[in-house]
Amino acid sequence: MKGIAHTLLLSLVLLPATLIRAAAPAADRIPVETFFAEADIRGVQLSPDGRYVAFMTTLGWGKVGIALLDLSLPGKGPEALVAAEDENIKTFFWKGGDILYGADIGGDESYTWHAIAAAPPKGGGKRQVRLLVASAHHSGRDYAELFDQLRYDPDHILIQGVREMNSGTVAIFKLNVRTGRRDPVASYDPAPDGVAVSDTADNNGVLRARAMYFADRLVYEVRPTPDSRYVRIAEFPPNKGDAPWDFLFFAADNETLYVLSTEHSDTNTLHTYNVRTGQWSEPLCHVEGGDIISLLTSHDRAKLYGVAYETERVHYLFFDTGRARLQKTIEQSLPPGTENTVVSSSDDEQIFVIRSHSDRDPGSYFVLDLKQGRITPIGRSMRGIDPKAMRPMEPVSFPARDGLVIHGYLTRPAGAEKSPAPLIIHPHGGPFGIRDDWGFDPEVQFLANRGYSVLQVNYRGSGGYGVKFQQAGYHEWGGKMQDDLTDAVKWAVAQGVTTADRVAIYGASYGGYATLAGLAFTPELYRCGINYVGVSDLSRQVANFKISFAPYNQLFGSQKLGDDSAYLHDRSPANFVQNIRVPLFNAYGENDPRVDIRQWKVLKSRLDEYKKTYEFMRLDDEGHGFRNEENRIGFYRRIESFLAKHLPVK
């Protein structure tokens, strides 16, 4: 990198009070809204020319919108750029001087895509919003997911959606962001042997590499040139659906493909593969005991600066001395003990947006200007959070009953360092390839503020601990994966973290399943449970995967979850509701595209049949998790009341 400053001047340019102000003073009981209202600032992105900063916020609108800050006008505050009337904006990115954004209605995760210019029209007037995709997945009209931003193509992106309405055939389209026209570039036709395809585009939007999953083999193919046919370069056994190679992206030359491989290692190893010559590089990076999670490249992808990898926390390994100096400068300019991440940069790599955060701090954003030699704050992500009032996450580990080492994070409430407190086991969703990480978690901090210790367990099947660890969880829903949570409870009791009579379990998605499984299969272990959009009937879930538009989901049921009929019956908590002996709280969204609302209907009928004690929330305008601010705050108020009643803090 060129022009990296060795020292910076810390210039505290304060923005309006709506964006940056002192945190609320520490209090014994922090309001629910402080944790779960919409963030003040998130998703901060710098325009390619470095002039504007855009970010998602409410700015008093109620709905999530996008605000714009013109860095060329230091005295001017942020401008409310766009807010949808009946949607919440979920994501956005820059496309030249335009901002493309996706908005969601009712939580079904099928985005409507729009574009708006950042610069005001010449001669004044209102900016015009261009509709690119009107998506309504559940009505069958359309469905569109971002496939590739195509950062070097000013006019196009790649999206994935259905080729013909109600056909079940998924296709990739090149979408013209100026005209809205889309042309198919690949399709995933349904096949009797369950084929699924994973494609990688070069920097011009041409699909050049793919992995094809069949029932009996996994095939890798590349196109040596943009206009050539695919050439097979490798074939592997299906290996439970795990791909030994992960094609990431092409370098600037559109021939060098970055690949993460576990073919010869348990955790991933970085290589490059030249699609024209067929040559593999020697290993570029491998970390024992951790996985590479992202690559750091120059803006044009011409040079690899380094990698980020994760163990208990995220670490960086730099190959470029200039980029290493930049990171050192950032670390010296910001508070100690934080993770400081470059989240966006200008095309010339002279202006950067930095996010600084920790386990106790949801983060602040800064603009680093190497030309000016200064770093200036944009604002705090959640200005009501006082980091001093939050609790630290402690990395922990313990042996499972079969000797496998299980890792996780323990967060204790104030005053519980030397005395037991009520404990909540909090399994993550996924389950496979996902993990809990070190960092600020509003759920965990909320529960700790209410007096509960929280144990987040990266049970077998979680990502980040190697292929063998992940595969150890396959076909173990309600089995060894659940045993890991049980063993976590026993470990916590033995360590004096809690006592055996003061333990609850709470999780979402797969974590909701684990909650139900915990109460049904180990009813003596927990005082109560909270199931948030959880699977109750595995047979129904596998059936949903088989009709899914997403090709990968079609293999998930058989190769990872398990589809033997006896197994599905015996591991479904809905079939063992009679065993539940403690209160249960359930929450579901009517429009959930991942865990169908019928999962709740089945569970509710069984709970009623056996006259079990339960509470529930069922919301018509939500999906896989409650996105609407009012609904979300209401949900956590219900959790607070439920726990206070059934797991009171002494």
Image (cartoon, rainbow, N blue to C red):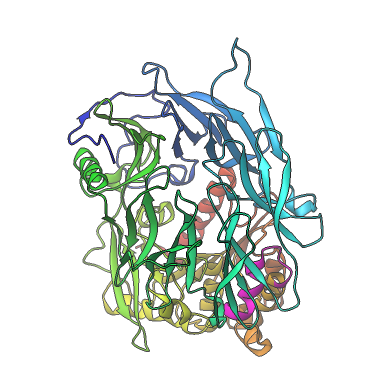
In the figure, residue 540 lies in which quadrant? bottom right
In this rendered view, identify the residue nearer to me: 84 or 38: 84
Is residue 404 shown to the viewer in this render?
yes
Give me the residue at 35% from left, 36% from top.
349
Q: Where is residue 126 in the image (x, y as percent from the top left)?
A: 63, 18
- What predominant SS class does the magenta segment belong to? helix
The number of callouts visible is 0
Left or right of 593: which side holds 474?
A: left
Q: Where is residue 491 in the image (x, y as percent from the top left)?
A: 32, 79
Looking at the image, residue 186 lies above or below residue 135: below
Q: Position of residue 68 (x, y in %)?
A: 49, 27
Looking at the image, residue 435 lies above or below residue 461: above
In this rendered view, identify the residue nearer to me: 336 or 375: 375
Task: Please identify the quadrant where the C terminus is shown.
Answer: bottom left
Q: Does the magenta stretch include residue 549?
A: yes
In the figure, residue 18 lies in which quadrant? top left
Looking at the image, residue 436 lies above or below residue 42: below
Work out which residue is located at the far top of the displayed protein and give it.
Answer: 123
Looking at the image, residue 139 lies above or below residue 234: above
Q: Position of residue 238 (x, y in %)?
A: 57, 81
In this rendered view, identify the residue nearer to me: 393 or 153: 153
Q: What stretch is highlighted in magenta?
A: 546-560
Q: Is residue 553 magenta?
A: yes
Is residue 134 shown to the viewer in this render?
no
Task: Please identify the quadrant where the N terminus is shown.
Answer: top left
In the figure, residue 468 lies in which quadrant? bottom left
Give me the residue at 34% from left, 57% from top.
308
Left or right of 232: which side holds 194?
A: right
